[in-house]
Image (cartoon, helix red, strand yellow):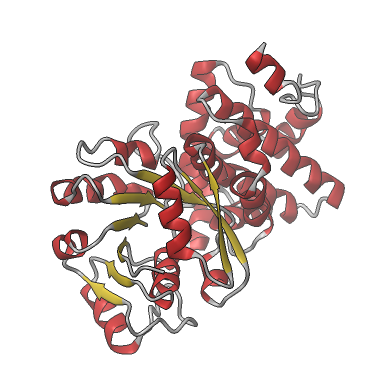
């Protein structure tokens, strides 16, 4: 495999796990982060103790706080920056880009300032349109310790997909490809809402039948929303859709699941956020998605019920009732999608 020069922007758990896989694959990898102490710790001890305390990093992985140098020396740039700072960092790197550089977003969520996906922010640069999105059931702590994991690289550009697959393939990390960036990215953002619903249900000790119903109806709601914005519903049957939804809706490692669990245990939203120490992405996503759903007349009873519960102090029974008495009749509403599309 030809040695590539790669940069990962962000010092968090997922960015570090990806950087480590690529360094282990023999590529030249730099990881940029603002925190000088974190840079020093990684370079001196081979550990990112704040985010991945139990994962020794490859000795060739170089942490740096020099953004300019990291971008200039890299052919491929993974942007693993939290959604709230994503736009600001992308604006900083734009003057450093060249037409042959590949940009990959690994961040799930929307721009907190407007209804916009991370890849939309990347596409606003006028220098390179070699852009992709990496998403899937990717709990970083599991990747770091070598649990087998599948991910999806979505891009309309075949070269972009091939490059990411080559960089990341390893005995424990498998990357599949998709051309539907919109679907893959919306799946990654939307599932956080439903992880809150599932955490809430788990706290109420509902049965397995109920959990299965919630997750399946969640998937229907996610795909209904995404198809309106141009996604292919079939994307939601894959790792980025169903796979990521299952992982996030059943994992106590998920912040969104934990927020739901605390609310189901009787805490209000503020107390739940304080309990986990940071705002779960799903809370902000929910506000934005409800606004868009209303604007476009999209039927989303679970999201709407959760919104009323979290923001309007409605009773929990309202959420349950909306699922059991909703107007939806069909189980799989895209069963005739292909016929309708070509008809």
Using the rendered view, name the quadrant where residue 45 is placed. Answer: bottom left
- In this rendered view, identify the residue nearer to me: 183 or 155: 155
Q: Vertically, is 236 above or below 332?
A: below
Does residue 59 sit above or below 88 in this rendering? below
Q: Is residue 282 left or right of residue 64?
A: right
**x and y percent of residue 146 in the render?**
57, 76
Q: Is residue 225 visible?
A: yes
Q: Position of residue 223 (x, y in %)?
A: 62, 32
**Count the marks: how many?**
0
Look at the picture and state if 190 lies above or below 24.
above
Quarter of the image with the N terminus is bottom left
- Say whether residue 272 is left or right of residue 26: right
Outermost residue to the front: 1
Rendered residue at 53%/28% (across/down): 290
Q: Position of residue 286 (x, y in %)?
A: 52, 37
Q: Quadrant of residue 69?
A: bottom left
Note whether residue 314 is visible. Answer: no
Quick one: 204 or 161, which is closer to the camera?
161
Residue 126 point in image, percent of width and height: 20, 36
Q: Residue furthest top?
A: 343
Q: Is residue 145 left or right of residue 47?
A: right
Residue at x 37%, y 48% (from the top left corner): 83
Q: Nearer the viewer, residue 224 or 104?
A: 104
Q: Quadrant of residue 250?
A: bottom right
Quadrant of the frame with the C terminus: top right
């Amino acid at each position: 495999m030809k040695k590539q020069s790669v940069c990962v922007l962000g010092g968090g758990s997922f960015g570090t796990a990806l950087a480590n896989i690529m360094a282990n694959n023999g590529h030249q990898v730099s990881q940029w982060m603002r925190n000088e102490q974190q840079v020093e710790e990684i370079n001196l001890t081979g550990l990112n103790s704040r985010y991945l305390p139990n994962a020794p990093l490859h000795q060739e992985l170089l942490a740096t706080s020099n953004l300019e140098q990291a971008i200039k020396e890299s052919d491929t740039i993974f942007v693993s920056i939290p959604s709230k700072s994503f736009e600001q960092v992308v604006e900083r790197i734009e003057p450093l880009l060249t037409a042959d550089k590949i940009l990959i977003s690994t961040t799930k969520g929307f721009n907190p300032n407007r209804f916009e996906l991370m890849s939309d922010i990347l596409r606003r640069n006028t220098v390179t349109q070699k852009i992709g999105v990496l998403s899937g059931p990717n709990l970083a702590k599991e990747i770091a310790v070598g649990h087998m994991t599948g991910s999806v690289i979505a891009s309309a550009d075949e070269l972009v997909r091939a490059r990411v697959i080559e960089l990341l393939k390893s005995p424990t990390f498998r990357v599949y490809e998709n051309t539907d960036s919109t679907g893959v990215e919306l799946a990654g953002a939307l599932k956080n809402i439903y992880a809150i619903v599932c955490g809430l249900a788990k706290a109420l000790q509902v049965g397995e039948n109920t959990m299965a119903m919630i997750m399946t109806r969640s998937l229907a709601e996610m795909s209904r929303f995404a198809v309106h914005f141009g996604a292919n519903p079939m994307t939601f049957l894959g790792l980025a859709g169903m796979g990521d939804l299952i992982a996030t809706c059943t994992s106590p490692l998920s912040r969104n699941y934990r927020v739901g669990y605390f609310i189901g245990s009787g805490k209000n939203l503020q107390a739940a956020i304080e309990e986990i120490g940071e705002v779960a992405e799903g809370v902000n996503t929910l506000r934005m998605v409800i606004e868009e759903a209303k604007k476009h007349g999209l039927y989303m009873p679970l999201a709407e019920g959760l919104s009323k519960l979290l923001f309007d102090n409605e009773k929990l029974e309202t959420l349950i009732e909306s699922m059991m008495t909703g107007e939806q009749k069909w189980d799989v509403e895209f069963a005739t999608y292909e016929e309708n599309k070509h008809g």
